[in-house]
Amino acid sequence: MTDITYCMNTDSKDLSKWACAFTRIWRVGQYYYGVNEEGIHRFVGSTDDGVPIVCSVKTTPNDLDSEALKRIPYSRVEARGAADIELWLDGTSAGKIHMDSVSKRAKFARGVRGRFLTFEVTSSDPSFTLLEIAPTIESLHRGYQ
């Protein structure tokens, strides 16, 4: 049976959701451990019984301290390893890119705009490390007559 486990960073209010077969997960030193009906397990390796472990991280929606609508035409992404990176504006996908290089200028869908910005990163590459996502933000202003 697979349970859903949540972990919240109380400083940033970011929430992590894990689908796993453990009732408790904790870290001691540099190792993670999980508990289920079968006992205590130390997490090692990059597969779960031969199946690659997929990691997905989604940032908290953020308006960047501005109530204005925004458009994100592109973003500079710096990472090591392979991953898919998706941009969301107000819950609408503005495009997904596949990252397999160290640095990339990601171009997202035209015409998508919103107030709240969210990035979602998904990878099964055990060597994947996200170093930076630096979006180019264009604030949209209404013309008044």
Image (tube, rainbow, N blue to C red):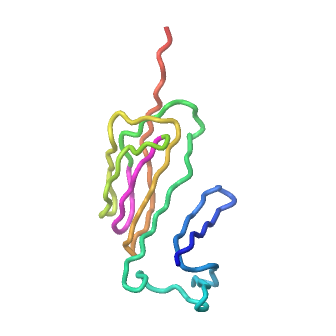
Residue 131 located left or right of residue 65: left
Residue at image coords 56%, 40%: 63
| Percent coordinates x, y for residue 93 in the rendering | 40, 45
Q: Please tell me whether residue 92 belongs to the stretch shown in magenta.
A: no
Identify the residue at the far top of this view: 145
Locate residue 27: give its quadrant: bottom right
Residue sitting farthest toward the bottom: 39
3 or 71: which is nearer to us? Answer: 3
Number of labelled discs? 0
**Is 86 within the magenta?**
yes
The residue shown at (33%, 49%) is 106
Magenta stretch, overall SS? strand
Q: Is residue 22 above or below residue 101?
A: below
Q: Residue at x 49, y 48 (%)?
A: 118
Task: Report the span colored magenta.
Answer: 76-89
Q: Position of residue 123 (x, y in %)?
A: 39, 67
- Residue at 43% x, 59% y is 121
In the figure, 68 relative to 40: above or below? above
Q: Quadrant of residue 131?
A: bottom left
Q: Foreground residue, 54 or 67?
A: 54
